[in-house]
Image (spheres, rainbow, N blue to C red):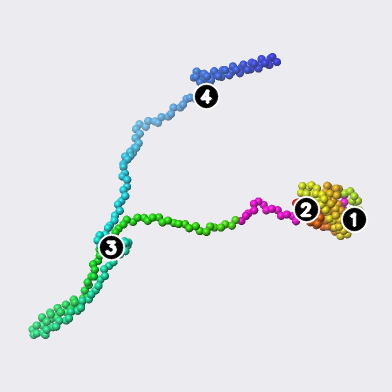
Amino acid sequence: MRGANILFNFVTLVFVILTLGMIAYAVAIAGDITAPPFLAPPTDVPTPTLIPDLGTPLPTPFLPTFTPSRTPPPTSAPELTLTPDGDAAAEATATPTQAPRMPAVTVTPRPLAPEPTQPPPEEGGEGQADETESDAVGSAARAALPHFTPTAAAPVVAVALATVRPSATPTITLTPGPRPTSTVTATPQGPAPPTLAPYPFIVQPGTPLLRESFAHGTDGCAWQGLAGTVVDQRGEAVVGVEVRVRGDASGEQVVLAGTGTDYGPSGWQVRLGGGPSAERVTIALWSGDRLLSPVVEVTFPAACAQNLALVNFIQTRTF
């Protein structure tokens, strides 16, 4: 025991010495007294490579200079309006697109002048008579031309030119119409509920089953009858339910489930006769006047190997 303590003390002393040595070494590295261990990263940095001298100076890049200039703010243009003067303003129409009215012109024909009485021609004066006759005809023709007399001078119309300004934005009034009506159809969520069976008990698949009698008190071939069980969905016994059996030759018999324990806790058994015979019988479960299962029909073949009919019932819902 003493030797073990000495060993442990020696190991502890060694670790204390190593710890102190590591602390001293770390302090020496931090104070640049000693170099770091070989695991430290290298401090030599490679010298960058210089661009070789090409012998010609590099061109100086051109940097454009920008001299800011003051831009005067835009001014609004004056509106030009022509004002009509005198009575011409009253004659101008409100809209510049309407054409000025033209003055009415009345044509007054001037009546023809009466034809002058020609003096009788004198001897030696034929040339003078012809000239006088030509002047009279020209005067009559000029008098027959229509004479145009203006009734009023054309007025001077001055149209005021106004600056066309945009009209105000029209206001649109929305009239709400009738609200749409929606028809909501309820959709059932999840699977549809199962349809209930017409009876709370069903016949177990695989039954009725005809075989030879095997239970106690069946007396082998000297016996013929029916038997079975009544259970729920978990296989637990359902006792107290009436089992009604009606045969063509044996008549009707009623037993309760749970009285034939040779077939199980809820077993039942009905004896039809003392030997195999060809007989047709019906079996069903009842509770008072209420039918609890479908009616099952069994026909015996009059054979010893098939003188027992097994019929089992299973409960599917409460009743």
Amino acid type of the residue that numbered disc 1 sits on in the rendered structure: Gly
Label 1 vs label 4: CA separation? 109 Å
Residue extent of the magenta highlight: 185-214
Quarter of the rendering occupied by the N terminus:
top right
Viewer-side label of 3, 1: 3
Q: Is residue 259 left or right of residue 133?
A: right
- Residue identified by numbered label 2: 201
Front in this rendered view, residue 92 or 281: 92
Does label 3 or label 1 sit earlier along the sequence? 3
Say what amino acid the circle numbered 4 marks.
Ala
Q: Earlier in the sequence, mark 2 or mark 4?
A: 4
- Residue 16 image point, x, y percent: 60, 17
Asked if residue 177 lies in the magenta stretch, the reply is no
Instruction: Report the disc number at residue 273.
Output: 1
Mark 1 falls on what kind of element?
strand
Q: Is residue 310 above or below residue 88?
A: above
* Residue drawn at x 26%, y 70% as measured from the top left: 104
Question: Rounded to the nearest whole Å, what is the CA distance between mark 2 and mark 3?
Answer: 112 Å
Residue denoted by label 3: 90
* Residue 279 can be seen, yes or no: no
Q: Residue at x 28, y 60 (%)?
A: 159
